[in-house]
Image (cartoon, rainbow, N blue to C red):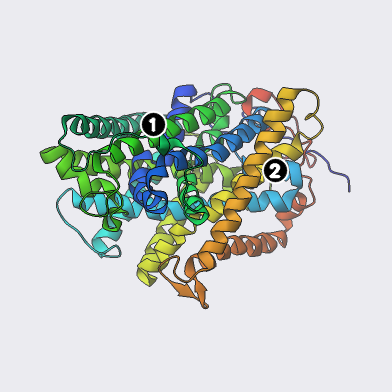
C-alpha cells in the first residue's frame, strides 16, 4: 500500500498559541498535573501498609520506568513535536489502529481522573468548614461540577492564564509540603513527635522487601502517582523551542517528583513511625488520608494548611488534566481520526475550543452519572486508572524503539536513549499492566463485583474495550477513510507545528 503525505496549508500549524510556554512554565504544568500533595495523601499510607519501612525505596523503584518513558517522550518529541503525542507517535510507528488506541488511552485516563480530582476537591472544600458528607451527596456533586466547569473555562481561555494560575497553585502546594517536612523533622529532633523513628539507610535498600506480592503492590501504587508529567509534552506546540523544551521539562518534572515523594515519605516515617495505632503509618484507618490524621498534632491550629494544600492540589490538577486530552483529540481531529469539529481552535485564545469543552462536558456527565449509579463503581473506575496509564505509556515506549530502529546502532548514545531505556520502560509498564489486571480480577480488590469478578478489572479493561468499539464505528465514516488508509498521518507526514514554515497544500487542495 502506498501512502501520500498530507500537508497543512496554514503556516501557524494547528492554530495553537505557539511560543507561550518556556521551560519553567512547562515544568510547572507538568508538576501540577501530577497533583503532588493529593498523590501523597492518597497513596503514602497504602504503600506503607504494603511494604512497611521500604516505602521510600518503593517510590525510587517506581521512578525508574517513568524516567525511561520520559526519555522516549523526549526523543519522539524532538523528531515529531506534535500535540497528539502518543496518538501521533503510535500512528507513525505502528499505523492508525495502534495510534488511535493510544489516543483513546490518554482520553480515558483524563476522564476518569477528572472525576476523582473534582470529587476530592469538593470533599476538602467542605472540610474547610468542618462539614463532612457522603461522596455522592448533592453538595459534593454540586461543588465538584463547579470545579470542573471553572477549570474547563480556564483551559478554554488560554494556556497563558492557565500557567499564571498554576504558578500560584503549585507554589502553595510546595510551601505546604515544605511546612510539613520542616514541622515533622522539628518535632522529631525535639522529641515531641508521637512516635519518633530515626532514619535508617535500610529504608532505601532495594533488596529489603519481605515478599514479592507486597513489593509489586507498593511499586504499582507508587508508579502511578508519577503520572501526569507528560502534560508538558502535550503542550509542545505552544512551547518555545518545541523540539527541546518539553522533553527537558518532562525529565526535570520526574526528578523533582522523585525528590518530593521520597523526602516527604522519610519525614512522615520519622515523625509518625510505622505503628498500627494512633497516627502511625501502619494504621489502616489513616491509609486513605494520612494528612487529615496528623494535621492537628503536627501543626496545631494551623492544621487547615494541609487541608487547603490538598484542595488546591486537586483543583490544580483538574485544570492541567484537561490540557493533554483536549490537545490529543485536537490532533486526532486534524488527522481525521475524529470528526472535523475536534480540530476547531479558538480564533482569539488559540486553544482547542471544541475539544476542551467536550472534555469538560464528558467529565461532568461521567462523574455525575457514576456517582448517582453507585459511588463504589466510581471508586473502582479510579482504581482501574493504572491500566489506561500503563497502556499508553507502554505504547509510547515501544513506538520510540520502532520509530528510531534505523538509528539505534549509529552511536552508543542513540542506542541507550532511543532504544534500550524506552524498551525497558515499556516492558516494565507492560508487566505493571498485566500484574494490575491480574490483581483487579480478584473480587476483593475494589469495592464492587461485576459478572462474578472484580469490578475494577471489568471497568478498566472494559474502558479500553469501548475504545476498540468506537474505533471501528469511526472507521465506517467517510472522513475516517484517509486516516485508516494511512494517508492523513503516516511516518512521512510533516510535523504540523508553526516553526516548520508553510506546508503547502494538501492532496485534495484543502486543509486536512
Residue 412 falls left or right of residue 104: right
Q: Residue at x 40, y 68 (%)?
A: 447
Label 2 crowd bin: few (<14), some (14–19), many (20+), radius 10 Å: many
499 lies left or right of 220: right
Q: Which residue is mark 1?
A: 161
2 vs 1, front mark: 2
Image quarter of the C terminus = top right
Q: Nearer the viewer, residue 109 or 355?
A: 109
Q: Is residue 367 above or below residue 395?
A: below
Q: Position of residue 187 (x, y in %)?
A: 18, 33
Q: Residue at x 39, y 41 (%)?
A: 35
Q: Can you name the residue that lies furthest to the bottom here?
A: 452
The structure residue drawn at horizontal position 28% and vertical position 37%, both measured from the top left corner, is 270
Using residue 111 as the reference point, say whether residue 173 is left or right of it: left
What residue is at 48 percent from the left and 65 percent from the top? Answer: 456
Mark 2 touches mark 1? (CB < 8 Å): no
Q: CA distance from mark 2 to mark 1?
A: 35 Å
Q: State the residue position of label 2.
A: 398
Give x and y (percent) for residue 409. Answer: 80, 28
The quadrant where residue 423 appears: top right
User: Which element type, helix, strand or loop, lies under badge 2?
Assistant: helix
First reached walking from the N terminus: tag 2 or tag 1: 1
Q: Nearer the viewer, residue 50 or 494?
A: 50
Question: Quick check: can you spot residue 17?
Answer: no
Tally of numbered tags: 2
The residue furthest right is: 1
Secondary structure of the residue carrying numbered label 1: helix
Give the x, y percent position of residue 388. Answer: 55, 53
The tag on residue 52 is none
| Residue 424 visible in the displayed image | yes
**Image x and y of residue 258, in percent:** 45, 33
Would you place residue 116 above or below residue 313 in this image? below
Amino acid at each position: 500500500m502506498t501512502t501520500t503525505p498530507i500537508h497543512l496549508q496554514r503556516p501557524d500549524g494547528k492554530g495553537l498559541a505557539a511560543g507561550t510556554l518556556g521551560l519553567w512554565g512547562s515544568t510547572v504544568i507538568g508538576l501540577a498535573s501530577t497533583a503532588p500533595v493529593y498523590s501523597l495523601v492518597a497513596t503514602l499510607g497504602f504503600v506503607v501498609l504494603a511494604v512497611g519501612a521500604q516505602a521510600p525505596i518503593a517510590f525510587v523503584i517506581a521512578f525508574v520506568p517513568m524516567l525511561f518513558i520520559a526519555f522516549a517522550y523526549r526523543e519522539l518529541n524532538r523528531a515529531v513535536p506534535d500535540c497528539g503525542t502518543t496518538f501521533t507517535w503510535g500512528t507513525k510507528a505502528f499505523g492508525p489502529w495502534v495510534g488511535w488506541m493510544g489516543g483513546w488511552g490518554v482520553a480515558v485516563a483524563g476522564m476518569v481522573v477528572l472525576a476523582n480530582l473534582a470529587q476530592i476537591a469538593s470533599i476538602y472544600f467542605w472540610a474547610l468548614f468542618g462539614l463532612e458528607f457522603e461522596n455522592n451527596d448533592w453538595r459534593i456533586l454540586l461543588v465538584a461540577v463547579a470545579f470542573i466547569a471553572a477549570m474547563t473555562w480556564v483551559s478554554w481561555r488560554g494556556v497563558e492564564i492557565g500557567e499564571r494560575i498554576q504558578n500560584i497553585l503549585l507554589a502553595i502546594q510546595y510551601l505546604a509540603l515544605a511546612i510539613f517536612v520542616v514541622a515533622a523533622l522539628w518535632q522529631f529532633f525535639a522529641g515531641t513527635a508521637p512516635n519518633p523513628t530515626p532514619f535508617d539507610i535500610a529504608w532505601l535498600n532495594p533488596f529489603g522487601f519481605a515478599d514479592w506480592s507486597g513489593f509489586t503492590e507498593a511499586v504499582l501504587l507508587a508508579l502511578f502517582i508519577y503520572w501526569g508529567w507528560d502534560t508538558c509534552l502535550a503542550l509542545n506546540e505552544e512551547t518555545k523551542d518545541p523540539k527541546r523544551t518539553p522533553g527537558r521539562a518532562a525529565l526535570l518534572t520526574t526528578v523533582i517528583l522523585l525528590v518530593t515523594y521520597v523526602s516527604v515519605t522519610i519525614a512522615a516515617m520519622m515523625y509518625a513511625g510505622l505503628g498500627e495505632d494512633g497516627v502511625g503509618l501502619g494504621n489502616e484507618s489513616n491509609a486513605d488520608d494520612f494528612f487529615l490524621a496528623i494535621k492537628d498534632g503536627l501543626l496545631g491550629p494551623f492544621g487547615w494548611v494541609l487541608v487547603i494544600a490538598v484542595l488546591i492540589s486537586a483543583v490544580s490538577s483538574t485544570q492541567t488534566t484537561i490540557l493533554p486530552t483536549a490537545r490529543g483529540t485536537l490532533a486526532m481531529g486534524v488527522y481525521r481520526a475524529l470528526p472535523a469539529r475536534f480540530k476547531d481552535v479558538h480564533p482569539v485564545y488559540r486553544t482547542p475550543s471544541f475539544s476542551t469543552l467536550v472534555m469538560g462536558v464528558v467529565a461532568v456527565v461521567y462523574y455525575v452519572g457514576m456517582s448517582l449509579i453507585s459511588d463504589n463503581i466510581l471508586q473502582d473506575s479510579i482504581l482501574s486508572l493504572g491500566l489506561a496509564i500503563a497502556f499508553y505509556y507502554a505504547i509510547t515506549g515501544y513506538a520510540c524503539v520502532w520509530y528510531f530502529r534505523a538509528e539505534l546502532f549509529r552511536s552508543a548514545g542513540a542506542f541507550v536513549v532511543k532504544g534500550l531505556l524506552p524498551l525497558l520502560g515499556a516492558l516494565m509498564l507492560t508487566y505493571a499492566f498485566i500484574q494490575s489486571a491480574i490483581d483487579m480480577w480478584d473480587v476483593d480488590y475494589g469495592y464492587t463485583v461485576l459478572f462474578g469478578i472484580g469490578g475494577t478489572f471489568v471497568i478498566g479493561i472494559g474502558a479500553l474495550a469501548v475504545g476498540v468499539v468506537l474505533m471501528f464505528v469511526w472507521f465506517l465514516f467517510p472522513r475516517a477513510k484517509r486516516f485508516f488508509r494511512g494517508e492523513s498521518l503516516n511516518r512521512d507526514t510533516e510535523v504540523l507545528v508553526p516553526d516548520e514554515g508553510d506546508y503547502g497544500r494538501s492532496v485534495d487542495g484543502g486543509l486536512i
